[in-house]
Amino acid sequence: MYNILFPGIIFCFLIGAVFSILFNRNDRLANHISLLSASIASILGIIFSLSVVFGDSFSLSISGSSYLKFGFFVDRLSAFFILIISIAVFAVSIYSIGYIREYYGKKNIGYLGFLYNIFILSMILVVSANNAIMFLIVWELMSVVSYFLVIFEHEKAETRKAGFIYILMTHIGTGFILLSFLIMAGASGSYSFESFSAYGSTMPPFLKDITFLFTLIGFGTKAGIVPLHIWLPYAHPAAPGNVSALMSGVMIKTAIYMMIRVFFGFLGGGVIWWGFLVLAIGVISALLGIMYAVIESDIKRMLAFSSIENIGIILIGLGASLIFYASGNPGLSALAAIAAFYHLLNHSVFKGLLFMGAGSIIYSTHTKNIEQLGGLIKKMPVVSVLFLIGVLSISALPPFSGFVSEWLTLQALLMSFGSSDSFTRIVLPVSAAALALTGALAAFCFLKTFGMGFLALPRSEHAEHAKDPNMPMLLGMGIFALLSILLGILPVYVLPFIGMIASTFTGASVIDQPFSYGVFGTITLPANRIYLSTPVLFSIILILILITTGLYLGSRRKNKLYETWGCGQPVSTARNEYTATAFSKPVQIWFRNIYRPIRELHAAYTVSPLIKESFKFELKIEQTFERYLYSPMVDLILRISRQIKMIQTGSIHAYLSYIFGTLVILMMFIILGGS
């Protein structure tokens, strides 16, 4: 069965890519063929990944010597990521059938379909490659194809800038990945991942530490950790909405996959400071990501910064898992890994939903600016409900999916109270407090987004004439919305299988272990069932009581209509409404030392310089990382380049002298080495 399903997945994506080009002149046909092929491939991917999770691993050898053995290998860890990719692709492909209609007659639809299928195929191959060279090939394919998707609307200057920053950062990350692979290949004598697993844990401690750091930088760049995140707020808003949903929902997770594979599989779990470093990066990324999301008025940039936050939450769980593993507590390591995995799954669902919701808003209103929206709950009622589900999920409110995974992460961190190490007992609860603050800021951020975008009155002509998009777009969003609800109310049926996956690299199964958390709630893990009983049931009961009470009181009270207060004006208008910038102003004041706001006041005068006709106030947030980290690095590289340029004289005699000098030096090394 495996030998049919895995090649079938590859074949369907290739069919979609090739036929998109062949039917390039017919936009509708090229669109439908490419997306139908991707949908079929995703269904095969779901079946294949579940078969591996509940069965045996899969391997496919292509060719090569023992030193360069090319092929693919899928175990439970790989299958979990293939499952996430396949679920996301199925929903996004259905959504794209309607979304891409916007480009008919304007852009090359066949070219887009080709890139779309190859991009997804490259992600599948990345998480199933079993050789370092094979991995680098498909990793580079994924990076280059996603770059062309980012610059699909290349006629815009900001899109070209976003593409340049993205391709530059991703290749810097690839350089560090290459260095880490070379170290492990030198230690094991082969580029095979199997040999990395066999010999990586026996490497000298210094080499293991260097490999860990290179891996963290290389894959952290793709994941979008702070301070390597600068490409993400540029690339995601520039890409088409359906591509943004895949990039944020699943592409950046491929980096998390390789971190887990290297840290646990190749390097054997490492030492405890690895976990503290990953935990610290996770906390910083989560806090800064959501803090910058709060003040954004561009809805897609806001979601991009939120992706940084959620990658941080995943890394918090992963860091805690490394700490517990290095401390000799594989059971708690498995519990923290389960929390990270469940949030990884949840984020792919609710972030895909929110990016598709943002794409639907842009599709109908032709603006990304939250300040120009408003009143969409009446204009786009179906999108409003679906988007609200995503908002509640990402805000970690029960009984939606985000609550379960963030609650599990908090519980794993609070288990450090039983640790014998005092530093661990301090750091992990502090990280739990930081995670709680992150959750509060996320709720604030998305309250602003939904309130200013969907409630009150339309604040522009764009919002005034908005309407729900076509059925395929609503159906694609509906799939993710349904999953956000099911993953929140039925974790009982999902978490045991994630526990099976976590046990493959932590070496412990927590399915049959009960864990008690006292006043924080209770999670019991008996007999192949995982119950998240206390917090979820309490929240559901409380919500039902509040809803019932509200409906009862509302039915008994007679409605009275009054004129809306509009700051003294008889009729409220959009000009009287609270803006998104004003809503986030308190947060800007609290964290002004981080935001470092720049205020500009422009006045327009009439006939006299003493009489001002109008004022224009502009507030900008300083790009701290670009100004204080990346700009100095760029300036340094340019200065060094100008100095090196001095040797480029244009003289053939000088170039011959360089060659002659190099040959003399090489001959000296050979002679000295022979003696």
Image (cartoon, grey):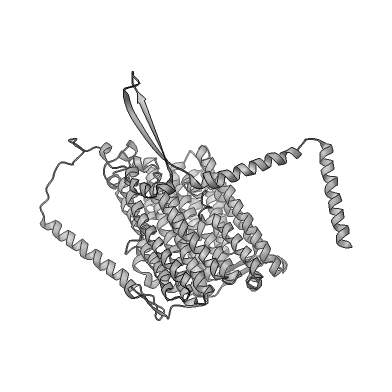
- Is residue 129 in view? no
Q: Position of residue 240 (x, y in %)?
A: 47, 46
The reply, left or right, for residue 217 in relation to residue 249 is: right
Q: Which one is nearer the viewer's eye here, 335 or 270?
A: 270
Residue furthest to the front = 422
Q: Check the image and report above or below for 330 versus 314.
A: below
Q: Residue at x 56, y 73 (%)?
A: 57
Name the residue at the top extreme: 607
Apparent side of residue 56 relative to residue 357 in the rendered image (left or right) = right
Q: Residue at x 68, y 62 (%)?
A: 182
Between 615 and 357, the residue placed more toward the observer is 615
**Residue nearer the viewer, 398 or 633:** 633
Provide residue 210's location: percent of width, then percent of height: 63, 63
Is residue 72 visible in the rendered image? The answer is: yes
Question: Where, quadrant-wise, is the N terminus in this rendering?
Answer: bottom right
Task: Locate the C terminus and report the quarter of the image it occupies.
Answer: bottom right
User: In the rendering, at what x and y percent does residue 288 appear?
Assistant: 44, 53
Q: How many marks?
A: 0
Classify residue 411 by image quadrant: bottom left
**Depth check, front residue: 350 or 222:** 222
Side of 343 where 194 appears, left or right: right
Measured from the top left, where is residue 296 in percent x and y?
Answer: 40, 46
- Going 30% across and 45% down the picture, which residue do you hit? 376
Query: Which quadrant of the view contains residue 88?
Result: bottom left
